[in-house]
Amino acid sequence: MRDPRLPSSPGFWRSPLRGPWFTSVLGVVLLGGITVLFVTGLVSYAAYNPDLSRVNDQTPDKGLLGFYLFAWPTNPHWLYRFTQGVHVTLGITLIPVLLAKLWSVVPKLFALPPARSLAHALERISLLLLVGGALFEFVTGVLNVQLDYVFPGSFYPLHFYGAWVFFAAFVAHTALKLPAAVRNLRNRHNATEDDLTSPRPDPSTVSRRGALWLVGGGSLLLFVTTVGQSLGGAFRSTALLAPHGGSDPGAGPGGFQINKTAAFAGIDATETSEEAWRLVVTGRTGAVRLTRADLLKMPLHSSALPIACVEGWSTDDQWWRGVRLRDLAALVGYDDPPDVLVESLQRHGAFRHAALRANQVADPRSLLALFVNGEDLTPDHGRPARVIVPAAPGVLNTKWVARMTFGDL
């Protein structure tokens, strides 16, 4: 008999809630939820167009992991707002389920012997990778959403590679455990694998169904206090756990969310004044330098588009007005708009420049915006000019634009 004072002993774990049915219910919920998380995470990475240009690629050594990348579309214009909102909101909502699942299987982490067979050894390895990967992905994701990322190294490659490691372990673990989980759900009183039930449980204070209701209630609470940052409007005031929850910042036409202020980005007001600022547009026929007055003489168009960020927050549709990107391409010799590299006055940061695909440039709603909601852009929203493109991640809608280089990238 093992010493019941040691965690390697089944008698050490006394909760009457643990059991194969309880664990299987949580596992099935995570099976669907984590699959959606993984797919929407890959979609988010594709939205950055990392195979278009090196400046967009935050994971340059991805190799075969970028096999699925595709040209990100511009329709519907709320596409990224939806997919990333689902990714972030679902990830936060699943936290109580994940924690309950880890709690329910914690005896297995201490079970001896470490491996009873090859299949058991594979299961233990996949479990270690699964637990470590899950904790890493959820912790880094939550910190990034809260704008308080403290891990060494860039969030993008760490979260990207971590997701692949985690999901590989998740697939292996699912293949090994799903048949037993299905049997446990069908016949909860005759579990096929009952190594989680305590041999001498403490008296019960809540049923397993009651515990599941508690987990579900925690998830619902997190959902309600997070989803408003993606829905916007009146729902934003319910997003108590989101940095961009609450009422819209400020007032007036520029009273909507941003991540970086002009001061934080190091933008000097003297270089954005009408006297000093020039937009350099380069292409097939050379380069032209345009003042704001020159841009105002060109045909101006309007688009109603949101801003959607990787952190899951988004704005409602804002009314932008400016010069179409394809009209700027025509200035430098392109009847059929090509790709474009957009560079900002911002001197530091991963997205002080960004590349856009030809389909994004050609879309008539894609603008070099000079106005928003009927007024000049504010400095924090990118004055004197910023890019706005339908369905693109917020960081690709470059602010404080200084140079645009059209051509194949």
Image: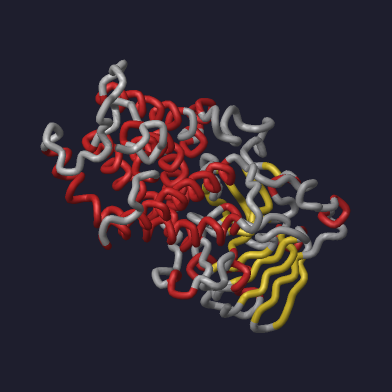
Residue 264 x/y as whole percent = 77, 47
Q: In which quarter of the image is residue 61?
A: bottom right
The answer to whether one can see residue 197 in this image is: yes
Give the answer, above or below, for where 25 lies relative to 155.
above
**Residue occupying the far bottom of the picture:** 285
Which residue is drawn at the image coordinates 76% and 58% (left, top)?
Answer: 346
Instruction: Name the residue located 45 percent from the left edge and 59 percent from the top edge.
Output: 74
User: Looking at the picture, does residue 5 appear above or below residue 347?
Assistant: above
The percent coordinates of residue 216 (x first, y second) are 34, 28
Residue 35 appears in view: no
What residue is rendered at 39% in x and 28% in y? 220
At which x and y percent is residue 232? 50, 35
Q: Residue furthest front?
A: 1
- Is residue 252 shown above or below 391? above
Check the image and tell me how it is coloured: secondary structure
- Quadrant where the C terminus lies? bottom right
